Image: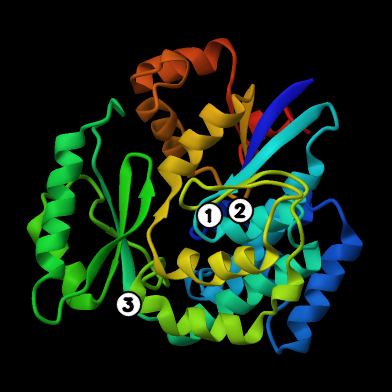
Amino acid sequence: MTTAVLICPGRGTYNKAELGTLARHFPDAGLLRHFDEKRRALGQDSLSDLDSAQRFSNARHTRGDNASALIYAASYGDACSIRDDIEIVAVTGNSMGWYSTLACGGALTPEAGFDVVNTMGTLMQEALIGGQLVYPHCGDDWQPDPARKAALLAQLDEINARPDHVLTLSIDLGGMLVLAGNEAGLTAFETAVPKQEQFPLRLPNHAAFHSAMMQPISDQGRARLSPDLFDQPKLPLIDGRGAIWWPGACDRQALWDYTLGHQVVETYDFTRAIQVAAREFAPDLFIITGPGTTLGGAVAQSLITAQWRGMTSKAEFQTQQAESPLLISMGRADQRGLVT
C-alpha cells in the first residue's frame, strides 16, 4: 500500500481559479448543506453561495470569515476523496490548515472543525489586527541560503526594536518568510529590503497571524470554543512546532490549549513540520489537499532544506518529480486523478 502524509493549506489559497471547487469536488452533499445551514444561522453567506458566485470578488471571498470556511471545506472534502489504497500515515498543515489538520486527523469531527474554523476566521475578520507580508530568502534554484535568511531575520529584529514598530516572523514557509506586524513595522521592512519581482508582497485581508498581536483573538477563541470539542486523533498530527500528537496519547486539554494559544500567538514553523513529516514517517507521497496550488513550492523547498532523498535544488526535485512523483497537489487537475 502507498503511504502518504496529508498537508492542508492555509489562507490565501481560494482565489479566482478556485471558484466552483466545492461544486466540482466536495463528496458529501449532506455535510455541505449542514455547513451552509450553520453559516445562514449566523447571518453569513453560505459556502454554496460563495462557491457558486458568478465572479470572484477579493472583497468578499478573501475575508477571513468567508475564506477560512471555504478553504476548510475544500481541504476536508479532498481528504475524504483520497483512494482507499493510499494509507495516510500523518497529517499536517500550514497556518489555518492546522484547524483542517485536526478534522482530517480525527481530533475534531467535521462539524466541530467547521465551528473552530468559522469562529476563528470570523474573530480575525472582525478585529483585523495588523497585517502580513511575504518575502523570499532562497533563490530561484531553491537552494537554502542560511546567511541570507539570518540577515533578513536580523533586519526584522532591528525594525521590531524601534519605537512603535512591531514586526515578527509569522510563518517559516519553505523558502519564504511570512512576516506579521503593524503598519509601521511592515512598511519599514518593505522600504529596507530590495524589491524582487512582486516581493515584498502584502497579503490582502490578512491580520498579524501567529504573533503576540493576536492575543485578543486567542482569548476570545478560548472563551467561545470548548475543550470538549477535541478528541483523541485517529492519525498522528504534526503541528506548527514540528511536535507530533499521537493517537491514544494526547492530552485533549493540551491540544485545545495549543490550538487556541501557541498556534495563534507564536511563529508557525511549516518548514519544520514538513521536515518532521519526512523524517519520522518517510512516506511514499506528500499529498496537498485543495484548494489552490500555491503550497507545493514551500513543501518542495522544505524537503530540499532537509535534503530529502538527496535533493539539494529545484532541478533535482523536478527530475525526481518527473521520474516518480512524490508531491501531489489535489488542486491541480493533472495530479488530482493520481490519488482519487
Q: Quadrant of residue 113?
A: bottom right
Vertical side of 153 occupied by 266: above or below: below
Where is the C terminus found, in terms of image quarters? top right
**Is residue 173 rendered to the left or right of residue 124?**
left
Instruction: Indicate the colouring scheme.
Output: rainbow
Which residue occupies 71% across, 51% down?
249
**Secondary structure beneath label 3:** loop
Q: Which mark is residue 13?
A: 1
Answer few, some or many: residues within 10 Å of disc 1's Cα (few below 14, many 20 plus, some between 14 and 19).
many
Q: Which mark is residue 130?
A: 3
Q: Quick one: label 2 or label 3, which is nearer the N terminus? A: 2
Left or right of residue 251, residue 143 in this image: left
**What is the three-letter code of the residue carrying label 2?**
Glu
Q: Nearer the viewer, mark 3 or mark 1?
A: 3
Q: Are marks 1 and 2 in contact (CB under 8 Å)?
A: yes
Which residue: 26% across, 64% down?
168
| Image coords of residue 173 (percent x, y) | 38, 46
Q: Is residue 123 above or below residue 241?
A: below
Secondary structure of the residue carrying tag 2 is helix
Image position of 204 (left or right of 45):
left
Q: Position of residue 283 (x, y in %)?
A: 63, 25
The residues bearing labels 3 and 1 have C-alpha atoms spaced at a distance of 20 Å
Q: CA distance from mark 2 to mark 3?
A: 27 Å
Q: Which residue is mark 2?
A: 18
Upstream in sequence: badge 3 or badge 1: 1
Q: Which kind of residue does numbered mark 1 sit on?
A: Thr
Mark 3: give few (<14), some (14-19) or many (20+) Cα within 10 Å.
Answer: many
Circle 1 or circle 2, nearest the eye: 1
The residue located at (67%, 30%) in the rendering is 4
- The local secondary structure at tag 1 comes to loop
Label 1 and label 2: CA atoms lie apart by 8 Å
